[in-house]
Image (cartoon, rainbow, N blue to C red):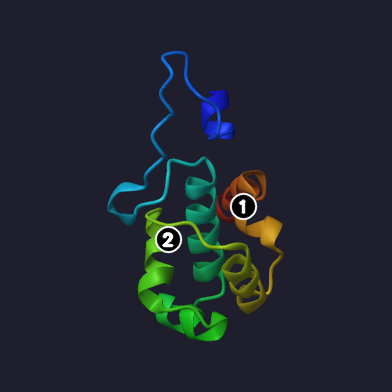
Amino acid sequence: MLCRLYPTLVMQDGQKPAPARNLGGRPRASTAAPAIRSGLRFWREERELTQTALAAASGIRQDRMSRFENGDALPTLGETDAIAKALQVTMADLYSDDLLRAMRAAAGAA
């Protein structure tokens, strides 16, 4: 584990660890992907926006926006900020599963 954190370390057999690779251009597994995916879709639909309209409002390409919603990519901090501003929510709102669950429950009870 330390070898991944400190790549200059040498493994016990004397070999240096291979650099981590990101195959196929896909992001590494992350617990943030499902949260941003559901939050992004929820708020976009709540604001009655299409992916194309949200992409235009946030200055992000539509194909990239689609990858965020599908969980195939994670937005950068700057992209997350632009999306949040376009949706008129905080960045935390995009990742808040508790808020999403409560809002969905309230919508279902109405």
In front of the other: 83 or 1: 1
Disc 2 packing (10 Å; few <14; some 14–19; many ≥20): many
Q: Farthest residue toward the left?
A: 24
In front of the other: 106 or 47: 47
Q: Position of residue 109 (x, y in %)?
A: 59, 50
Q: Which mark is residue 23?
A: none
- What whole-number distance in Å separates the C-alpha atoms at marks 2 and 1? 12 Å
Name which residue type carries label 1: Tyr
**Residue 47 location, quadrant:** bottom right
As helix, strand or loop, the secondary structure at mark 2 comes to: helix
State the residue position of label 2. 69
Q: Residue at x 42, y 57 (%)?
A: 73
Q: Position of residue 95 (x, y in %)?
A: 62, 52
In front of the other: 38 or 79: 79
Disc 1 packing (10 Å; few <14; some 14–19; many ≥20): many
In front of the other: 106 or 51: 51
> Would you say 66 lies left or right of 78 here?
left
Q: Farthest residue toward the front?
A: 14
Q: Residue at x 52, y 62 (%)?
A: 75
Q: Position of residue 11 (x, y in %)?
A: 47, 20
**Residue 5 location, quadrant:** top right
Q: Earlier in the sequence, mark 2 or mark 1?
A: 2
| 44 to 59, vertically: above or below | above
State the residue position of label 1. 95
As helix, strand or loop, the secondary structure at mark 1 comes to: helix
Name which residue type carries label 2: Glu
Q: Farthest residue toward the top?
A: 12
Q: Position of residue 51 (x, y in %)?
A: 42, 75
Whether tag 2 and tag 1 are in contact, CB under 8 A, the answer is: no
